[in-house]
Image: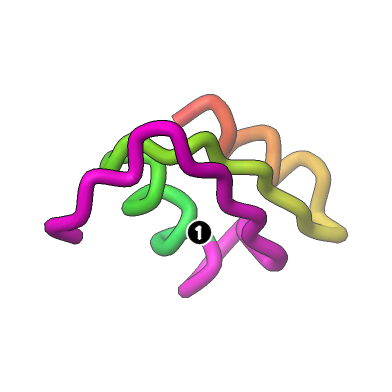
Amino acid sequence: MAADLSGKTAVVTGAASGIGKEIALELAKAGAAVAIADLNQDGANAVADE
């Protein structure tokens, strides 16, 4: 992702795995503050730790 998202906030649902996880990680790399949500709490916590 080429955009600078510093100062922006994103909410990603289904972020514990698959496309949601990859989107959350890319948004974070671009500087966004990312709130993640998933029914799989352990998986969501693992992604948050990344």
Front residue (pair 37, 3) = 3
| Crowd rating for badge 1 (residues with CA inside 10 Å; few <14, some 14–19, many 20+) | many
Looking at the figure, which quarter contains the N terminus? Answer: bottom left
Label 1 residue SS = helix
Q: Residue at x 44, y 31 (%)?
A: 50
Q: Main secondary structure of the magenta part?
A: loop
Q: Which residue is mark 1?
A: 21
Q: Residue at x 13, y 57 (%)?
A: 2
The colour scheme is: rainbow
Specify the amino acid type for callout 1.
Answer: Lys
The answer to whether residue 18 is magenta is yes
The answer to whether residue 5 is magenta is yes
Instruction: Tell me the magenta residue range.
Output: 1-20
Give the percent coordinates (x, y) of residue 23: 43, 63
Q: Residue at x 56, y 63 (%)?
A: 17
- Reply above or below: 50 against 8: above
Give the percent coordinates (x, y) of residue 33: 52, 35
User: On the rendered structure, is 15 left or right of 31?
Assistant: right
| In the image, farthest residue toward the bottom | 19
Front residue (pair 32, 50) = 32
User: On the rendered structure, is 47 left or right of 12?
Assistant: left
